[in-house]
Image: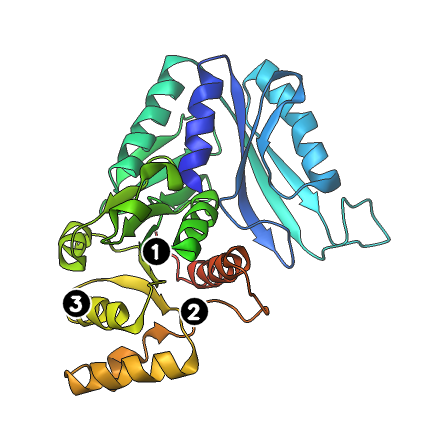
Amino acid sequence: MIIQFYQQLLQVLKEGDAVVATVTRVRGSVPREIGAKMIICAEGRTFDTIGGGLGEAQVIQQAIEVLETGQKQCVEIDLSGTPERETQGVCGGLMQVLLERWSGEKAIALTDQILNYLQAGKSMILVTSFDTTSPYLLAYEHPISTSDQTFIETLQPPPTLLIIGAGHIGEKLAKIADFMGFKIVIQDSRPELTQPERFPPNSIIFNQSITTVLEQLTCHNNLYIALVTRGHIYDIEALKCILNWNLAYQYIGMIGSKKRIKLVYQHLQESGVSLYQLEQIQAPIGLEIGALTPEEIAISIGAELIKVYRKQPKNPV
């Protein structure tokens, strides 16, 4: 996720200069998406990836030159596998990667500013020029005029995952989702299960009611919810609040057998929840991979979160 990238970049910049490689254009089948980034430091040290293989090796090689000269470069990576010309792979597509040196206090200040926005839950627009102009930020609502000489990308804060239920699956899901880059929020009334050491650092943990939690998340527009509670009574209680709250969630999933899910739906409909609202729930939660253990179930839920997250439409810029 993008916040981890800029945290790493800030650490690197405090030690010296670095090149930021950004995928700015793709065509056909390629290993990474537009906006994918990696960091290249002196002596070829790297962080993150723009796809690996011969194409990435070429990027690293040219990045060392950019580190020395400070002049931006665009690298064209040919993955078409066309036998008539030299290519870097056989994926079937083409990638354009912009290489730009980030150095000194100005780059540190820009990285700090990006992190402050992301950590505050705010989106922004990063404008990177293909000429000698340094990258700069614009407010998310700022009108944008596109140009062949600039690469414009929306930087969004990490998605938030609200995990309702701090049992075995909730604990494992928190660790997996944190690794995937989600901001973690835990809700469970049992103090013995909500000890901070059971969850990733910086997790937000609530022992209060679900209503109290939702009051804190009303402004989140990149919210995902996973119900992994200890029983259907807790599912009903939580879902009554969630489905009747003004939440802009991207995903809501509920664990349980077919019998449990049917029972929950029946109670919700009797309390006035519409069929349309029930159709928004992914139940049973997770991709069908034959998962049995808490770890496997957490992985299946994590996979479903990725599937939903990656299918979200990109904000127009």
**Circle on res. 241:** 3
Q: Residues within 10 Å of mark 2 (few under 14, many from 20)?
A: many
x 43%, y 77%: residue: 257
Residue at the image point whose x is 30% and y is 50% from the top: 186
Residue 60 screen position, x and y as percent:
66, 29
Quadrant of the snapshot with the N terminus:
top left
Tell me which numbered mark, 2 or 3, is placed earlier along the sequence: 3
Dot 2: what SS? loop
Of labels 2 and 1, earlier in sequence is 2
Disc 2 to disc 3: CB gap under 8 Å: no
**Which label is found at residue 285?**
2
Q: Nearer the viewer, mark 2 or mark 1?
A: 2
Query: Would you say 256 lies left or right of 246 here?
Result: right
Chain-order first, disc 1 or disc 3: 3
Q: Please, what is the three-letter code of the amino acid marked with disc 1? A: Asn
According to the picture, the residue beneath numbered tag 1 turns out to be 315
Q: Decide: is 179 above or below 66.
A: below
Q: Residues within 10 Å of mark 1 (few under 14, many from 20)?
A: few
Q: Residue furthest front?
A: 192
| SS at mark 3 in the image | helix
Kind of residue indicated by mark 2: Ile
Q: Can residue 123 be seen from the camera position used here?
A: no
Disc 2 to disc 1, C-alpha distance: 27 Å
Q: Residue at x 52, y 57 (%)?
A: 299
- Give percent across and percent down for residue 8: 47, 27
From the viewer's perspective, is 209 left or right of 235?
left
Indicate the secondary structure of the residue bearing disc 1. loop
